[in-house]
Structures are given as structure tokens and as C-alpha cells.
């Protein structure tokens, strides 16, 4: 439980963008005996305006190793960072409670700005979206958590037209352009 409390505190800190506040968690959990296999949501009202701003989702199930004990697994966190009633950040966790996916809307316009997907706690793919649009503008792929490939849709027609290949996240190896409009780069150059 200590690690859960810690991760929740970290999340709340993020929500406050470094600020501090008194956190009151609404405990809506019914009797634990009734919670086997149930989803549980803990909520918090960070700015104390009477409306919840942070939601932490858990899945509870019976502990297969300890009869009568309930295991609680973190599955999802959501927060309304600017307190306008719309969720701006969603984090989804895998069966090991590792971060699997994070979606953010940091300009608070109601449209997601990026989705980052993780594998074994390492970033795997990060997609950035056009303002007010659902189409991906920049796609970044990572190997062992290090940048390996970038694709961009520079003329915003929904098809990638610019590519970069990176080595170990630090060295740009080559830069490509898609000349025939099929979304795959076919003309490559050494970076200048
Ligand atoms: Ca609030
Ligand atoms: Ca918001
Ligand atoms: Ca946005
Ligand atoms: Ca394009």
C-alpha cells in the first residue's frame, strides 16, 4: 500500500504542478468483503471547490495466496488540472501496475495533445496531435526507451512526409522525405 500512496502523492503533485494543498480523499469504498472483483474509485477535490478533480481507479480481487485478503490493483488515474470540469490527463496501468499509456491535453482545449505508450515502464511510442484535430502530427518510436524514429506530417494532410532515424536516442543517422505521397519516406539524406 505504501507504494500506492506514494504514487498517488506523486500524481497529485503533478496535478498541482508543483504546488501544495490539503488533500481530502473521499472514501466511498463499501465493505471490503463486497469488493471482490469490483472496480473502486478514489476521488479528490484538490482546489476544494466541492467538485472532484482527481480520480484513481483500482480493481479489487481476492488474494490467491492469502484466503480472505483483498488485493487492490491500480488501473487508471485521471485529473482535471485546471479545474474546468474536463479531464486533462489520463494514465492507464498494466496488470503489474506499471504505466502503460498516458493521454494529455495540456492546453485544456478539450482535445488530446499527445498519447504516450509504455512497455515495461519504458516509453515505446509517443504521438502528438494537431491542435483541435484527431490526426497525428508527429510520431516518435523508441527502442529500449531511446528515440529510434521520428515521422512527421509537415503539410498536415494526414500522411507522414518527413522521417528521421536515430541511433541510441542521441545520434541522428538520416533524414528522409516521402516524395510519392504513400506515407513512407523514399528519399534519404545524411543530416547536415
Ligand atoms: Ca475541485
Ligand atoms: Ca480540465
Ligand atoms: Ca489540447
Ligand atoms: Ca503529409
Image (cartoon, grey):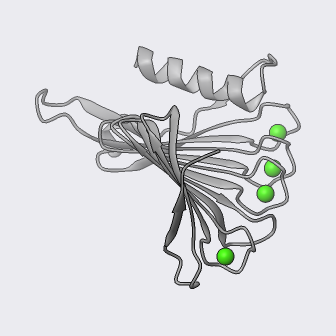
Residue ID at (19%, 34%):
63
Residue 73 in the image: above or below residue 88: above
- Res. 24 visible in picture: no
x and y, in percent, of residue 43 in the image = 64, 38
Q: Nearer the viewer, residue 107 or 19?
A: 107
Number of marks present in the image shown: 0
Which is nearer the eye, 125 or 187?
A: 187
Question: What quarter of the picture does the N terminus occupy?
Answer: top left
Provide residue 77's location: percent of width, then percent of height: 56, 42
Closer-to-camera residue (163/16): 163
Q: In the rendered view, tell whether residue 106 sits above or below residue 24.
A: below
Residue 13 in sight? yes
In the displayed structure image, the side of residue 123 where residue 14 appears, left or right: right
Locate residue 121 relative to residue 112 in the image: left or right: left
Residue 120 drawn above or below residue 109: above
Q: Position of residue 84 (x, y in %)?
A: 87, 50
Q: Position of residue 144 (x, y in %)?
A: 35, 36
Q: Image quarter for residue 152?
A: bottom right
Which quadrant is the C terminus positioned in?
top right
The residue shown at (51%, 35%) is: 171
- Which quadrant does ligand 1 occupy? top right
Q: Is residue 110 left or right of residue 175?
A: right
Residue at 82% in and 19% down: 19
| Front position in the image: 186 or 101 | 186
Residue at image location 29% in from the left, 33% down from the top? 71
Amino acid at each position: 500500500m505504501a507504494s500506492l500512496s506514494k504514487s498517488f502523492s506523486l500524481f497529485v503533485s503533478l496535478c498541482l504542478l508543483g504546488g501544495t494543498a490539503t488533500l481530502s480523499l473521499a472514501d466511498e469504498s463499501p465493505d471490503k468483503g463486497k469488493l471482490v472483483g469490483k472496480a473502486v474509485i478514489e476521488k479528490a477535490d484538490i482546489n476544494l471547490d466541492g467538485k472532484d478533480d482527481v480520480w484513481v481507479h483500482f480493481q479489487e480481487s481476492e488474494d490467491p495466496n492469502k484466503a480472505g485478503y483483498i488485493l487492490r490493483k491500480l488501473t487508471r488515474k485521471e485529473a482535471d488540472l485546471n479545474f474546468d470540469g474536463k479531464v486533462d490527463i489520463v494514465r492507464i496501468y498494466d496488470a503489474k501496475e506499471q504505466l502503460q499509456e498516458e493521454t494529455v491535453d495540456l492546453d485544456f482545449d478539450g482535445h488530446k495533445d499527445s498519447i504516450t505508450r509504455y512497455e515495461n515502464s519504458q516509453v515505446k511510442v509517443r504521438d502528438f496531435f494537431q491542435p483541435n484535430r484527431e490526426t497525428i502530427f508527429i510520431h516518435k518510436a523508441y527502442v529500449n526507451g531511446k528515440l529510434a524514429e521520428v515521422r512527421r506530417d509537415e503539410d498536415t494532410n494526414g500522411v507522414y512526409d518527413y522521417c528521421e532515424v536515430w541511433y541510441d536516442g542521441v545520434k541522428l543517422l538520416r533524414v528522409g522525405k516521402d516524395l510519392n505521397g504513400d506515407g513512407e519516406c523514399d528519399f534519404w539524406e545524411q543530416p547536415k
